[in-house]
Amino acid sequence: MSNAARLEDRRLITGHGRFTADWQLPGQLHAAVVRSDRAHAVIERLDCAAAAKVAGVVAVLTQADIEAAGINPMPGGLSFTGKNGQAMKKPAWPVLAKSHVHFVGQAIAVVIAESASVALDAALLVQIDYRELPAVISFEDALHGGAAQLHAEVPGNLAFEYEDGDERAVANAFATAKYVSRVTAICQRLVGNPMEPRACAAAYDGATDIYTVYTPTQGINGIRNALAQIVNVAKEKVRIVAEDVGGSFGIRSPAYPEHIVCIHAAKRFSRPVKWVGSRTESFVSDNHGRALSLTVELAMNADERFLAIRFDNAADIGAYATSFGAWIGTRNLTVTMGGVYRIPAMYAQSRIAYTNATPVSVYRGAGRPDIAFAIERLVDHAAAEHGFDPVALRRKNFIPCAAMPYKTSNGTTYGCGDFAAVLDDALARADWSSFASRRSRSKGAGKLRGIGIATYLEASGGGAAPKDQVEARWDKTGNVTVYTLAHSSGQGHETTFARIVAGALGMPIERVHVREGDPDVTLVGSGTGGSRSLLGAGSACKVLAENIVGVARTYAARLLEVTESELRYASGRFETHDRSLSIADLAVRLAALTPHPFNLIGEGSFGVTFPNGCHVAEVEIDPQTGRVAVLRHTVVDDSGNVISPNLVEGQIQGGVVQGAGQVLGEQAIYDRHSGQFLSASFMDYPMPKAGIVRSFQLFEHPVPTATNALGAKGVGEAGTSGSIPAMTNAVLDALRPLGVKNIELPATPAVIWNAMARAAQAARVLEQPV
Amino acid sequence: MAKVAMKVNGKQMSGDVEDRTLLVDFIRDTLALTGTHIGCDTSQCGACTIQLNGRAVKSCTMLAAQAEGADIMTIEGLAQGDKLHPVQQAFTECHALQCGFCTPGMIMASVGLLKDTPKPTDEEIYHGLEGNLCRCTGYINIVKAVKRASQLMAG
Ligand code: FES
Ligand code: FES
């Protein structure tokens, strides 16, 4: 474990990072995208003539060009079937809109020009005549009888119905239940907004027929395969160059239309083509997140034990199916639908609808925060409704440590976890028992104070590739470069992976260099996503180091003139009774051999892990304004073994604050009738700012997993999963004495103020003499 | 097109710009100083923050022509050779950056904040960094770093 500063920091704090917009390719052209400003319309006329005539414009490309080049539509959909064996209905998503537009921001035409400003100027001259159609922008409106139809092949806009669990067992349990509670948890539509706006550049080499694509990404293999499939070339013909990536949160994993147009244009005009999106374009055309509503019911017996849980989930996936969009409201929810609780009967059904909004895909957690939010709102709500203690109710229903490994009633096996101990730890760290005095202090100051608790458990680690590989290449001076496919967008892989390798080889970390996203390595492995890089690629680093030690032993034995069994290995040194040799020295001595004998691969298939934890949030509400201040947020996390505590803490802090953004303000707001996106700028979309969470503490409570070489569990999304329910429960705890029972997110000052006003009015009605 | 000249990181620089060229585009495209970033189109994110005549300024809020004759420092000019500025030092020590995209602007804004308020309270830091967005860190470590830098600068 080390808390030393990160190796990647120096370039980033001195202005020498290299993000996609920073690349200047010799002879490059620039692209500007003409986007739909209508939510739902027929394109009656698309006239690019005036734009094409502007001096410096090379071409204006439309879907006709894309189709003529034999380019496929954007990929998406599901690989599994749903209720009654149905397949998901997946209308084609053309790279550029052809006859219809289905959301504000959809790409229609692309101007290619000598400079970015000429391209932007010319884009304004593209003329489009629309015949507007009624728009539907929410799940409910989309499924409403008589709603406007988006796609001819999707009657009623219903894309997919899914179910999991045992419906009959759940119905039986509800029939015998003593207590029942029900709550609706809405996870509003969000915009990921990594700080680096989306950008890409493509170059084509006619001699080798190879495309080089510069793009922010979460992993070069995934994006390369997707681009090759869409453009219809062998994947070996696409090289991805990615260096620094300015945040991702899921937004960067798929291919986007701009990639495809730049690739096409680079070949067609034999010059590199670069596109740098604006923030407005990020808002309207980066895949959105969440957009789910979960209605969940709990059945309990007289003993307050959970008998059954039942979900009715509604997911709005926007205008088209992205590659991951429909996973979020289905399998990503149900894999852990019982959370940390022992629930004998579980059932969930989900319905997925198309709407005239930006397509949805994964955003930090992608179903995990949503299910945690629903479960923990439900448990808190049930406790309040039936007068149970929320802590005791949780404790009573936890899956006990002794029951591990535990197979849930819908078939997921949790390997390990000590939920009761994590809860106790969190309560102590958060001074739960002395809350009453803090509440009365706030009351004295005219403020409403609330405390909220939430547990979470999530599945992390599943990756698209069958295994994870990393590769070592040694140079003449005995320094090693480790190549990985798991791309960082802030996680600090260069530091953590180097620590793993350097630590196991007993080498100074300065001699281990980690290279992500080298386009010329041919490794198998998944990209970053699902909180899996440490337990996947990180574990492969550990295996790599062990492989190197294994090969090194043979050479060490030879040099020290002993048998291998006579050698002891400890902290980077092979020792006999009187001599020793370090791996680092050995690497230098072998450097004349080509290839270097330590040029090896580390690999493995590492299973899913179940990070879990408990968050306690403490908030204060100003009843005059409805403003919520998050005074204190305490996290006790079981993320298994930790390599870099400061980096783990950073991940949790970032996740918690993204959760705070969702709870307190963020929302992609669309006009219900016109389908216009009303909050598509930083002026209208309240991003979390400094001070949104005043004080933060993280404590690790590791229960190492046996499913990977490091004993690590996922950490990237955990902060979000716990903070959303904990903060919402805290807000409700503050408001409950006034009679407020539930609240819809985001809990903006207006929402809070209105909830208080409504509760006060209801109380007045009750007080009136009959 | 017009010619503009200014001092950037201690060196006299000049270039031809359109009247409408923003200072940030001049810095990035003409001067090839790509450490100054563009994160928005509404002057809200602060990724483009530089020092202009000793004040922290968002370089997307002004035209290149308005900087004629100015003395500018970008993130590339902050360290003295190999020696980091105390704010840079504090950012790396406190793990106040993850992806690093907001970081140059965050550092330049913090330098400005500490010039005005050498010993800021938490509230003063929240206020001082109100115009700078970070999506990765949750700001907790950024606030710590500003305080740490304040200590380092006090010597
Ligand atoms: S780019 Fe200047 S404030 Fe965002
Ligand atoms: S470190 Fe990524 S936006 Fe601040």
Image (spheres, rainbow, N blue to C red):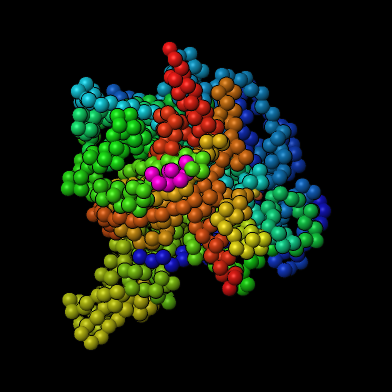
Where residue A110 appears, x then y in whole percent?
A: 63, 38
- Quadrant position of the C terminus of chain B in the picture: bottom right
Q: Is residue A2 above or below residue A263?
A: below
Side of A6 relative to A408 (left or right): right
Residue for point 47% across, 48% down: A631
Quick one: A397 or A410, which is closer to the camera? A397
Examine the rendering and report whether any part of residue A381 can be seen.
Answer: yes
Does the magenta segment cover residue A437? Answer: yes
In the rendered image, is residue A727 in sight? no
Span colored in magenta: A436-443
Q: Main secondary structure of the magenta part?
A: helix
The mark total stands at 0
The image position of residue B143, as x and y in percent, is 53, 57
- Front residue of A207/A345: it is A345
Identify the residue at horizontal 36%, vertical 28% (top origin).
A183
Residue found farthest to the right: B2
Q: Is residue A141 left or right of residue A551?
A: right
Quarter location, residue A511: bottom left
Q: Position of residue A601 (x, y in %)?
A: 33, 62
At x 57% / y 26%, what residue is drawn? A671
